[in-house]
Amino acid sequence: MTGDRETVVVTGLGATTPLGGDVVSTWAAMLEGRSAARRLEEPWAEDLPVRIAARAAADPAEILGRVQARRMDRCEQFALVAAREAWADAGSPELDPERLGVAVTSGIGGIGSILAGYDTLKEKGWSRISPFTVPMLMPNGSAGWISMEFGAHAGAHSLVSACASGAEAIGYGIDMIRSGRADVVIAGGTEAAIMPLNIGAFAVMRAMSTRNDEPERASRPFDRARDGFVLGEGAGIVVLESLSHARRRGAVVHAVAAGAGYSSDAYHIAHPAPDGAGVASAIGRALADARVDPEQVVHVNAHATSTPEGDPLEAQALVKALGPAADGVIVSATKSMTGHLLGGAGAVESVAAVLALRDQVAPPTINLEDLDDDVPVDVAAEPRPLIKRGAEPMAVLNNAFGFGGHNVTLVFTAA
Amino acid sequence: MTEQDILAGLGAIIEEIAGVPVDEVTPNKSFVNDLNIDSLSMVEIAVAAQDKFGVKIPDDQLKDLTIVQDVVNYVARNAEGSA
């Protein structure tokens, strides 16, 4: 306990992303500044205005094996693969199952299973639909599978807030430990939505980049020539643990999961509020919850998806929330490399934020050739060292926002 | 179609759907207790058996087919009946 409440720490990290099938390969590719975006060669992409995406580097079905994979949606497969890695990284803790919780979610859920099931329904009739279709399409399926894998009885939860989902799940996991419901929580987000319906639906909103001839240059947050996001897929998982529990078992602590802040724009179902007030509120509430001063913040893993509208609003909200302290903050947008993992984004980017803190380096924002005039923050185009600014301990933020007006900010501090 | 043919065909289906090695699918094994096959996978197995053997297993029959030999018998009886 720290004073009046339990301190929550991160003891395990897992990720399967377009840049790599695990944390080490993903982080190495981020520091190298590699783009995972590629041209979509599937015939279904031919007639779409967007023919690029960032596919996961490793096929989770191969890792899990045919029998398990056929019962799980691809998003659930990603989540389980990343959860296994995070659990092993945490040292596979032995604890009372009643004290182990899960908070893993998805922005969309098993959309591939919905589409495949509907095709089967139309072509072959209801009796040929897989009897696993419902557990494959439900957005809480990943939480259920992970609870079974690790025997977690404290509760398995799946808050859904579109592209803020993965970050919100981590915030919920922090609350589970602080409120005394669990000692350890497996938390994160996942998505597998590189399907014609999703691409068409985002494209018709004019939210996606159509830089089809240069996929690796398409995701370019904060750059003047950005024209929308690139869809990615994969999962990020963290193992959260009370500091007292981590100490008792001698666990390696990657970072302190210091706090979370939330707000809702209550403005438009898909557009961010034009004054960025909601984002600034989430950041301010997160700092208050974490008991962190703006001067402690050295780095922000931004939500920045590479849309014309969203990126400058986020940057302006950072300045609003951090005040003069915003000057010393190094901002990175790793979606420039991974693409946008939707419900997985906030979780993968939290993994990146924790690694940035651990290694004291901000990953680059690739394709940043001409910083937009409306972006009043220091964006790292190359990897940059993170240097303590006097106030202790160093803190990093991860922002995640979702359609519906959901804003989530997580704060991690040095262990 | 002999009983051996049906058993071999059923074994292949169960291996594909539930991952049970085909040589473990022997006549006296219980689907639930021995082969660890749940009711959802049994639905898949029944549909695959219908495709393979041309014998539809209605739900009210399926619930009574508890061991491998029960399915073999059901398929043999109904395949002959329809032949």
Image: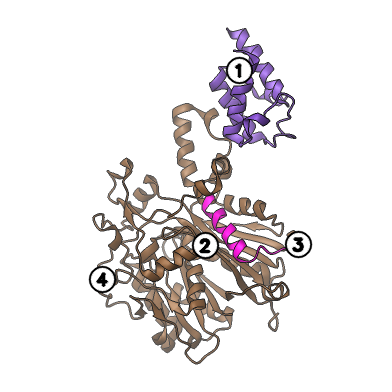
User: Which subunit holds the residue at mark 3?
Assistant: A
Q: Residue A201: where, in percent of width, then height?
A: 36, 50
Judge whether residue A273 can be spotted in this image.
no
Q: CA distance from mark 1 to mark 3?
A: 49 Å
**Looking at the image, is A398 positioned above or below residue A145?**
below
Three-letter amino acid code of the residue under disc 3: Asp
Question: Circle 3 is placed at which residue position?
Answer: A96
Q: CA distance from mark 2 to mark 3?
A: 26 Å
Quadrant of the image containing the C terminus of chain A:
bottom right
- Reply yes or no: does residue A85 show up in magenta: yes
Same chain for the residues under marks 2 and 3 in the image: yes
| First in sequence: mark 2 vs mark 3 | 3
Letter of the purple chain: B
Residue labelled with disc 4 = A224
Mark 2–mark 4 Cα distance, whole angstroms, equals 28 Å
Label 4 or label 1, whichever lies nearer to me, is 1
Q: Secondary structure at mark 1?
A: helix
What is the distance, in whole Å, between disc 2 and disc 1 at their CAs?
50 Å
| Label 2 SS | helix
Residue depicted at 67% across the width and 19% down the height: B72
- Classed neighbour count for the residue bearing mark 4: other residues with Cα under 10 Å, few (<14), some (14–19), many (≥20): some
- Please give left or right for residue A113 compared with residue A221 in the image: right
| Magenta residue span | A77-96
Rendered colour, chain A: brown
Q: Main secondary structure of the magenta part?
A: helix
* SS category of the residue bearing label 3: loop
Label 1 lies in what chain? B
Q: Nearer the viewer, mark 3 or mark 4?
A: 3
